[in-house]
Amino acid sequence: MNRATAKKLIERYFRQLTEGCGNSNCRNEYCASSGDFQPLDKNAAAARALELFKVNAKLCDYYPSIKSSTDEKTQMCSQISVEDFSDVHYLTEPSVCRILSFCEEEGDYSALVRVIGRIFSNADALMKSFRSDEPNVTENFDSPKATDEEKQSEQTSEKKGASSADALPDDTLNGMLDSYEVTVDIDGVRRVYDRLLSIDQVEAALVNAIIYLTPNVELDLEYLNVYETNPDYLNIFIIVMENGNLHSPEYLEVALPQFCKAMSKLPVTALARLSKLWSTYDLPQIRRMMETFQQLITFTVVSNEYDAENLVNDDETVVAATQCLKVVFYASILGGDMDVEHNEDEDDDSESDELTLHELLGEERLYKKGPRVDPLEKELGVRSIDGITPLIPFEDFINESVNDVVEMDKDFTFFKVNAETKFSFQSCPFILNIITKSQGLYYDNRIRMYSERRLTALYSMVQGQQPNPYLKLKVRRDHIIDDALVRLEMISMENPSDLKKQLFVEFEGEQGVDEGGVSKEFFQLVLEEIFNADIGMFTYDDETKLFWFNSSSLENEAQYTLIGIVLGLAIYNNCILDVHFPMVVYKKLMGKKGTYMDLSDSHPVLYQSLKRLLEHTGNVEEDMMLTFQISHRDLFGYPILYDLKDQADQIPVTKENRQEFVDMYAEYILNRSVERQFKAFKKGFQMVTNESPLKYLFRPEEVELLICGSRKLDFEALEKATDYDGGYSKDSQIIKDFWETVHCFGEEQKRLFLQFTTGTDRAPVGGLGKLKMIIAKNGSDTDRLPTSHTCFNALLLPEYSSKEKLKERLLKAITYAKGFGML
């Protein structure tokens, strides 16, 4: 416990000993409000406060007095109200409306303000309020006075609430901890708020009450473990979050930040219960909660200035609100369409007992094996990848204001090294956009590369060999697959860690130092060869223009491992590949099996047939005449029969079992039939990415964007981001002619231009505006073609004499250029 927190607690004990808590019925022997308490002078109270702090003695909640109007008539009504309602120690829907009716008759709301302020500022009173097990919760609320039965009910419920945790048997208590069921009448709370929030005085009382309430709740949760002894403590947060005005300016300054800090102190079991409860809410309610936390984050970020010294990671309000937003994020997943069953089998890599060189160098924490697991995710038993269609789209949880100010180099350090002591936004990746997350992945990859360099230098010193800090591939252009396969196979068997080094490619007999551009062309040529229809490793769909694994391929598994390694190396070396896979491939790489819905983009014709089967209203057995035996064609076009079940040809597909047939059909096509090929492919991918935070940070659609780049080409953004050198500027006539020419290109010509200039025809993550292309002057008017340095995204453009000549020379260059050393 830090000194500031200890000081706050001691001050609370001192105030309790000298002033009391304000509760006339207090039974705490260490509180001045208790009837049995012996008064102390200030010195004795200070000494006693220190003793109570050391033994962690009981602390009372503070009952503040909410100031009313100074008007004489208002004071008189206030006195009457206190006299009439001082026995209200917790709230129910009937009691609130009874007090409200009284105030409306008197024309003064000060009595209601006092009761609301007193109950909402006291954790114990609020926890017992609005209970779903309270009798007569649906009573008509027009009666101004409580009946004897109602008073008796309140007293009984008060006693019941005070001892709710003690009265329950252990198995029931554990069941409550594991369940989202709570003892709050949520509908009643919402009706009460609808009545109260229309009264300005009550709104102010609620704001003040939360300000009084939350610091004590935060301390109780952090140091007194109140939730473990009484799970009903969660009711406080459920009730407060039903306030539909939490996002308003009155709360944003103080009340809501303090509330978020208190909520972030809840144990994981409590947060999981909240998430499960909120997942049952209607979309408007859960979206309101999401927007409340998002608004607080945005308001706080734009109200402050952050830099390398003053990090947003150190802003307690932003951190707490982000952690609260995580609860809503998982609630959105739980409440939407989920798939928690179809998971790919993970290979269990047996860990050696021997110390690795990384560990000997003190780097074991930075290179922990195995995927990172979020505690709340583990408690809920659900992952973000399990969400098929969440209640709220994933992109709505991204907060751009945070993405604008977060320092990803510092955040990465917190994520990998100081996770126990410093907050990292990568522990809540839902709030980050793919551009920011890719920066974090870039730092991870680069640091791993530098580490491998150091290890290589150390090995070379010990063994007296020439250091080899790079993953060097020397290949012949005409035998690129054979050369790459042999070299990568040797590396993967002898020293797989070499795959973590920076890639350095050399084409035999060609000039060109690889600073990124040669690698880009290497990847492109490998993919052209691998996906060649004549090889038969993949099938191609002319309609979708996508490739799928050929279940009848004659190629060995090493070929598929190679393409997996290539995809991993592309991510690791920040290269974009021209790969055309359906989304289900990236889902499977991230650990999810393909299901029926994934057929819609991978096998659209089959998907439509199965959909018609599921929607058929007639006699399925007689009309369709299908059995559980299916057929598909092999590499040479011959039909192959496959039994989905034993004696499949004897089992007809009926209305009752058609869903089972569809699921088994999809399971065969997407998983079982290509198991050998995909397993080898995934093995190669994981050779490079197994220690990367890729799986933790990114969803399948984001992994596709990392590998393939964006298919949207915004050349207007590219023009704005381009720099000029060698005497050119954006106002040079040839530059104006150049952009007019490029903007008039067709889609295919634009892709050829990008390929010529950058080595790939795709936009990077974030679009072409992130490319930073350079156009440099390369002499005066000439017949020479434009040239490029793809390593630096640089176009060397002579100053042609006319726009027509510029267009002719440029088109020839981008159409026929290939290889390095071409003049």
Image: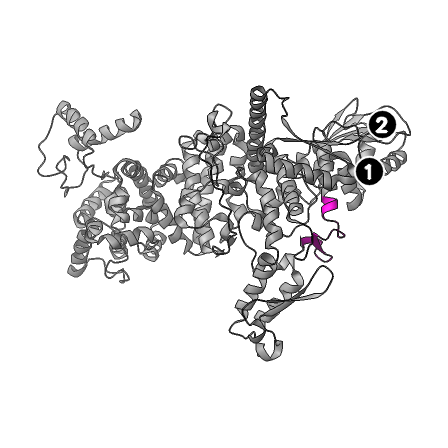
Where, quadrant-wise, is the C terminus in this rendering?
top right
Expressed as whole percent of the image width and height from the top left, the position of residue 782 reads 90, 27
Q: Residue at x 56, y 28 (%)?
A: 447
Marks 1,2: beta carbons within 8 A: no
Mark 1 or 2 closer to N-term? 2
Q: Which residue is drawn at 70% across and 38% down?
A: 484
In this orientation, which residue lies closer to the viewer: 390 or 155?
Answer: 390
Question: Does residue 114 lie above or below 518 as drawn?
Answer: below
In this orientation, which residue lies closer to the viewer: 791 or 7?
Answer: 791
Residue for badge 1: 814
Expressed as whole percent of the image width and height from the top left, the position of residue 55 reads 18, 32
Query: Are there few (<14), some (14-19), or many (20+) residues within 10 Å of tag 2?
Result: many
Q: Distance between the residues labelled 1 and 2?
A: 15 Å
Residue for badge 2: 798
The residue type indicated by label 2 comes to Pro
Mark 1 residue element: helix
The residue type indicated by label 1 comes to Ile
Expressed as whole percent of the image width and height from the top left, the position of residue 58 reads 19, 37
Expressed as whole percent of the image width and height from the top left, the position of residue 104 reads 28, 53
In the image, which is nearer the foreground, mark 1 or mark 2? 1
Mark 2 residue element: loop
Task: Give the left or right position of residue 495, taking residue 38 as reference.
Answer: right
Q: Which residue is drawn at 23% across and 44% down?
A: 73
Q: What's drawn in magenta, residue-wise?
A: 527-548
Residue 434 appears in view:
no
Task: Give the left or right position of residue 544, taking residue 181 as reference.
Answer: right
